[in-house]
């Protein structure tokens, strides 16, 4: 009787491990499928004054959001279109 109980317990735990591995593999596949590969950016002129620097940046869809500080101007965000490699918008607080 004890041997059957042990066999049943081993079977249930084995199935739980296999199910967990399948769920993990599915999650990893979904995460990797959602990542878009973009081509490297070429050099573009941001038309900022001397002393300006990129303090932070974020990539969202096909746009780069560059947080610019310095250069004798207020902090600003430059939105760059990654496909056309042009400045889409400049956002600043005055």
Image: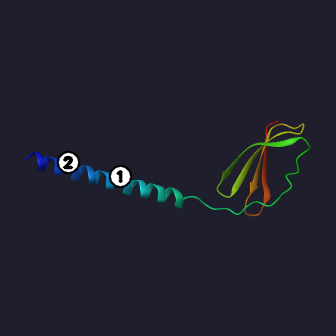
Q: Which sits earlier in the primary sequence, circle 1 or circle 2?
A: 2
Q: Does 92 appear above or below 47?
A: above
**Image spot of residue 41 (x, y percent):** 76, 60
Mark 1 nearby-residue class (10 Å; few <14, some 14–19, many ≥20): few
The kind of secondary structure element at disc 1 is helix
Residue 76, numbered label: none
- Left/right placement of residue 38 relative to residue 52 reads left
Q: Nearer the viewer, residue 70 or 22?
A: 22
**Image spot of residue 69 (x, y percent):** 82, 39
- Left/right placement of residue 22 relative to residue 41 reads left
**Image spot of residue 17 (x, y percent):** 32, 52
The kind of secondary structure element at disc 2 is helix
Residue 20, numbered label: 1
Number of marks present in the image shown: 2
Mark 2 nearby-residue class (10 Å; few <14, some 14–19, many ≥20): few
The image's colouring method is rainbow
Give me the C-alpha separation between circle 1 and circle 2: 17 Å
- Left/right placement of residue 16 relative to residue 6 reads right
From the image, tell me which residue sits under label 2. 9
Residue at (67%, 62%) from the top-left corner? 38
Residue at (88%, 51%) from the top-left corner? 47
Q: Does 61 appear above or below 75?
A: below
Q: Nearer the viewer, residue 18 or 35?
A: 18
Name the mark nearer the viewer: 1 or 2: 2
**Image spot of residue 86 (x, y percent):** 80, 59
Q: Quadrant of residue 61?
A: bottom right
The quarter of the picture where the C terminus appears is top right
Residue at (83%, 57%) from the top-left corner? 44
């Amino acid at each position: 009787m004890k041997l059957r109980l042990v066999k049943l317990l081993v079977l249930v735990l084995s199935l739980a491990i296999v199910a967990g591995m399948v769920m993990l593999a599915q999650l990893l596949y979904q995460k990797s499928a959602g990542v878009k590969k973009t081509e490297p950016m070429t050099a573009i002129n941001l038309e900022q004054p001397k002393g300006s620097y990129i303090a932070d940046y974020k990539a969202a869809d096909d746009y780069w959001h560059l947080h610019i500080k310095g250069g004798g101007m207020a902090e600003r965000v430059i939105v760059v279109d990654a496909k056309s490699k042009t400045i889409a918008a400049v956002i600043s607080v005055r």
